[in-house]
Image (tube, grey):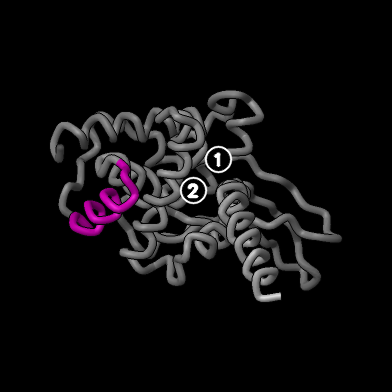
Amino acid sequence: MKDLHSHSRTIGHLLARLLLPLLALSAFSIQADIYKYTDKDGVVTYSSLKPMGLTYEELIPSCLMSYIGCDMANSDWRKVALNTEAFKDLVAKAAKRHNVDAALVRAVIHAESAFNRKAVSRAGAKGLMQLMPTTARYLGVGNPFNAAQNIDGGAKYLSELLGRFGNQKLAIAAYNAGPTAVTRYNGIPPYKETKNYVKRVSTLLKRYRSVIN
């Protein structure tokens, strides 16, 4: 009986190890899936979880929904002032921990929140790297406004996307539009905001690499 229990535990551990990557990708796929609906109290709500029993609208990425807004999103990112000092140690630590280019982490922070750790988008994404609530919970980010937690979670997410797609621009696109959209279109989704986002982050990445690496 003891051997049987031991054997069962071994099988359980093996299944967990096999299923964990799949669960991780499933959890990450909801990063940019945004649903807009009116709840039973008449309140317009944005959620990363599909509402059950309610009429909803699935939103595509838009600068109108982002924290930085359309004016800043449409800036000339070749000339926007860089910020190499804010959260410098936290970015370096998270990048090293998750084997991600620190310049990429900094570029995403700049593009998402302009280094405002209290940033909240209209869709409910929070913090420096604008994590949606469900994704934040999966990543173990208990407080998205805590800079250390948010940056570590965002760096982990980027690492997962880079591992999944094996391509930097596709990973950046997935950060904005979600992995499901990138897989569906077998490339960068044809959303104006996502295309602009990839250019924005890529431009910032190149500039940050030239000054911090």
Q: Which residues are magenta?
A: 87-100
Taking the spot 43% from the left edge, 66% from the top edge, the residue there is 144
Residue 55 appears in which quarter of the rendering?
A: bottom right
The residues tagged by marks 1 and 2 sit, at their Cα atoms, a distance apart of: 7 Å
At a point 52% along the width and 37% down the height, the residue shown is: 174
Name the residue that disc number 2 marks: 66
Q: What's the residue at 25%, 44% (across, down)? A: 102
Which residue occupies the foreground of this view, 90 or 47?
Answer: 90
From the viewer's perspective, is 179 left or right of 43? left
Q: Residue at x 61, y 31 (%)?
A: 183
- Residue 129 placement, left or right of 104: right
The residue type indicated by label 2 comes to: Ser
Mark 1 = which residue? 62
* 83 to the left or right of 6: left
Q: Nearer the viewer, residue 9 or 178?
A: 9
Q: Amino acid at mark 1?
A: Ser
